[in-house]
Image (cartoon, rainbow, N blue to C red):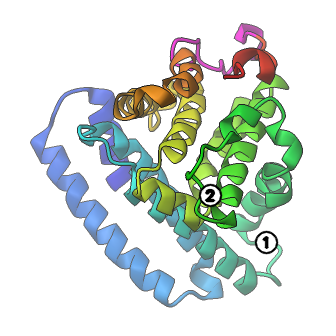
Amino acid sequence: MSISCLYLLIEGRDTDPELELHRANYLEATVQQHRETLANMTKENSDPACFVSVLLTMDAFANLRFRQLEPYEPPLHWLQMSRGLGGVFQQAIELLKDEPGAKMRSLVDTARSYVGSNVVFCKSNREGLEHLLEFREGEIQDESDVTAYENVVSYIGSVIRGLRSSEDPKMISRRLTSFSVVVSARYIELLRFQKPRALVLLAHFFALASCIRYTWWVGSSPGREVRAIQAQLGEEWQALMSWPIEQLEKEPYAPDEKDRAPWPEATAVIPNV
C-alpha cells in the first residue's frame, strides 16, 4: 500500500496531506514487519521477503525526487538499503536451494546472465572509458580504491553495451536497478567522503538511468542528481561531467524498438579528456 500511495502522489502531481500520512504509516508498518521477517527467514517467508526488499528499494529510489540537493549529499540511504538486497537474496537462495518452484528463483536465474559479477565487472567493459580512471596525484589511498573505481566503470560500460545492442528496455531497467546492489562498500565509503571521482561516476550512472525516465519511479531524479553533482564539483572535474550532462538532453530509450535511435559507440559518446 505504501508504494501505491507513492505512485498516486507522483502521478497526481499535487500534494495530498492525507495520502502522504497514509503512505508514511503504511511504510513504517511495512519496514517494521520486514525487519522482523529478515530476522527470522524461513523457506515459507523467503519469497515474500525478497519481493518486499525489491519494492522497498524501488520506493527508496522513487523518493530521491523529493530530497534536498543543496548542499549536495550522495543518496547514501538508497545505496545502503539497496546493497542489503543482495544479502537477502543470498540467504533466500540457500533456504530455497531445494525448492525449484520458488518464485524468486526465476528472478535470480535470469539476472545472472547480465548482472553477475563476471559479466558486470569484466575488464573489456571499460574499453572507451579509460579516461574515467586516469587518477591524479594523491587521489588513491590504496588498491581497494582502484578496484572500487574500476568496478563501477566496468558496470557503466556493461549498461552502455546493453544500450548499443538494443537490449530490451526491461533488461536495461534491471541492469540499472542492480547498480546499488553490486557496487562495493568501499565505493559507497568514497561517496560518503565526497571524493570527486566517486561523484563523477555516480553522475554517469544517473545519466544512464535518465534513459528510462518515463518509468514512474525513476522520473526526474536522475537529471536532478546529475546537475547537483555538477554544481558540487570544482572546475578541474567539469570536463568529465560533459557526457552525463549531454545524456540528459537525449531522447529516452524508447520501449518500442522501432522508435529507438541507435546508441552510439562508447568512444563516440564519451570523449577522451
- Number of numbered discs: 2
Is residue 170 in view from this perspective? no
> Where on the picture, by quarter, is residue 97?
bottom right
Identity of the residue drawn at 55% across and 15% down: 246
Check if mark 1's residue and mark 2's residue have beta carbons within 8 Å: no
122 left or right of 150 in image = right
Amino acid at pointer 1? Gly
Residue 257 within the segment the image draws in magenta:
yes
- In space, the residues marked 1 and 2 are separated at their CA atoms by 30 Å
Numbered circle sitting on residue 183: 2
Numbered circle sitting on residue 163: none
Labels 1 and 2: the sequence-earlier one: 1
Residue 196 locus on image (x, y percent): 48, 43
Say what secondary structure mark 1 lies in. Answer: loop
Residue 204 within the segment the image draws in magenta:
no
Identity of the residue drawn at 46% across and 54% down: 191
Q: Quadrant of the N terminus?
A: bottom left
Looking at the rendering, the stretch of residues picked out in magenta corresponds to 247-261
Q: Which one is closest to the eye, mark 1 or mark 2?
A: 2
Q: Mark 1 packing: few (<14 Cα in 10 Å), some, or many (20+)? A: few
Is residue 89 in view from this perspective? yes
Pick the residue in front: 211 or 240.
240
**Residue situated furthest right in the rendering:** 124
Residue 229 locus on image (x, y percent): 40, 34
Pick the residue in front: 263 or 217.
263
Amino acid at pointer 2? Val
Say what secondary structure mark 2 lies in. Answer: loop
Identity of the residue drawn at 47% across and 88% down: 39
> Where on the picture, by quarter, is residue 271?
top right
Q: Is residue 150 above or below residue 26?
A: above
